[in-house]
Amino acid sequence: MLSDNAIVNGTSTSTRFITSTDFLALNNVNIGYNVPKEYLDRISLKTVNIWLAADNLFNATARQGFFPNTSETGNSGRALFAPITTMTVGVRVKF
């Protein structure tokens, strides 16, 4: 149990605080679509590619708000941050 000694006997030896460390995460996704050539010929383009890249989309764990893939040293420092979710959308055009 992560308690920073805020709970009496929180650091005592016991199995009552054991929680599964199993987790399911979706860390990276890249999706792209090429516009068919038949549509591009009308507007004099060679290639149009639309894409989406995303990181840290999903994390399911028995410990709500705890990320098992980050480091926890057991001290009271709060320099830990959850991995942020980022999404990038782009369009690549060749003339």
Image (cartoon, rainbow, N blue to C red):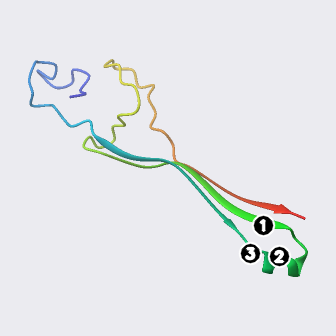
Residue 76 in picture, x, y percent from top left: 34, 20
Q: Nearer the viewer, residue 35 or 59?
A: 35
Which residue lies under the disc numbered 2? 40
The C terminus lies in quadrant: bottom right
For label 3, the SS is loop
Alpha carbon of mark 2 to alpha carbon of mark 3: how far?
7 Å
Q: Say left or right for 6 vs 57.
A: left
Which residue lies under the disc numbered 1? 48
Disc 3 marks a residue whose amino acid type is Pro
Using the image, determine if residue 40 lies above or below residue 76.
Answer: below
Q: Say left or right for 15 vs 39.
A: left
Q: Say left or right for 17 vs 79.
A: left
Using the image, determine if residue 21 lies above or below residue 78.
Answer: below
Q: Are marks 2 and 3 in contact (CB under 8 Å)?
A: yes
Of the residues under marks 1 and 3, which one precedes in the sequence? 3
Which residue lies under the disc numbered 3? 36
Residue at x 24% of width, y 43% of height = 62
Quadrant of the rendered image containing residue 31: bottom right
